[in-house]
Amino acid sequence: MKQIRAVIAGVAGKMGSRILGALRAEEDFAVVGAFERPESPQVGRDAGLLSGSGPLEVTISGSIQGALQKKADVVIDFTVPAASLHNASVCAERGVALVVGTTGFSAQAKAELAGHAARIPLLVAPNMSVGVNVLFRLVADAARALGPDYEVEIAEMHHRAKPDAPSGTALRLAEVAADALGLDAQSASVYSRQGDIGARQPGTIGVQSLRGGDVVGEHTVWFLADGERLELIHRASSRENFARGAVRAARWLVGQKPGLYDMQDVLGLRR
């Protein structure tokens, strides 16, 4: 079996360490590199110590360039927008596929990522969970079937340390619903309601954020009409499902043509 040679960005982070453990459990993957920000105390250590599975003989580098000294097939990146953009430019220069699970990208940053995808296969997904990506499809189908008579509201809840709001997943849910209803997500989305706001405006999608505790992630989408409502809910109780999804995405991405992909492509849910 030919192994897929993977490099992990932000390997000491909450997601990076879990991705490392998930990759080590797969026979068709070999971890050939790992890196952290230059000032991280983990730089210079054996990456295997982070997964609790023993030494790996892969030293944590302080840069993506150092981690790519050995030939690699794919980089998996769950870091921050600025770092992910830099990593995407390096991967594009070196012809290495890239999986990005980072959230909080601006419109300009998304355009930059799309530009790099002209040179490499690049997968960007706000949520790597297989269940969440099935939720995206269910929301699209429900919005299309129910139509504009059903009002759409979205709420997301995450742990107290999550820096961006709304979550990338909530924004994607709003985009999916808006597309199915023929709306522009940016102008249709309402992120705050306070004071004497009057009646709910037609053609809008409410998106609300809650923060607290150690909540890994919870997303609810309501379709509301007179006399009934439909609720679609996804709750994540562990980050392991995100790691497993990232591994699945990396396996699928290697060997694809240059282009911009997401988990809908991986799961065969693209219409």
Image (tube, rainbow, N blue to C red):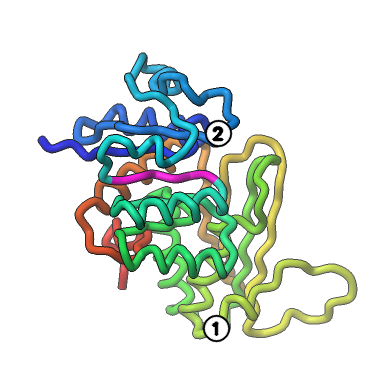
Mark 1 lies on residue: 183
Query: Residue at position x 41%, y 19% from top?
Result: 46
Can you say whether 112 is above or below 10 in the image?
Answer: below
What residue type is disc 1 on?
A: Leu
Residue 128 as seen in the image, left or right of residue 164? left
- In the image, the segment drawn in magenta is 74-79
Q: x, y percentage for residue 11?
A: 46, 33
Q: Is residue 182 visible?
A: yes
Residue named by callout 2: 38
Q: Are marks 2 and 1 in contact (CB under 8 Å)?
A: no
Dot 2 amino acid type: Pro
The C terminus appears in which quarter of the rendering? bottom left
- Would you identify the image quadrant in which residue 158 lies? top right
Disc assigned to residue 48: none
Residue positioned most to the top: 54
Magenta-drawn stretch contains 195 = no
Identify the residue at horizontal 83%, vertical 80% (top origin): 198
- Secondary structure under the numbered disc 2 in the rendered image: loop
Task: Single out the mark in the foreground, 2 or 1.
Answer: 2
Residue closest to the far left: 1
Q: In this orientation, which residue lies closer to the viewer: 247 or 202?
A: 247
Mark-to-mark CA distance, 2 and 1: 44 Å
What residue appears at the point 35 percent right and 15 percent down from the top-left corner?
55
Indicate left or right for 74 with 109 as reference: left
Mark 2: few/some/many CA within 10 Å (<14, 14-19, 20+): few
In this orientation, which residue lies closer to the viewer: 208 or 104?
Answer: 104
Task: Judge by depth and name the residue closer to the eye, 41 or 93.
Answer: 93
Q: Is residue 75 magenta?
A: yes
Looking at the picture, how far across and down is residue 214, in whole percent? 64, 35
- Rendered location of residue 252, percent (x, y): 25, 51
Q: Main secondary structure of the magenta part?
A: strand
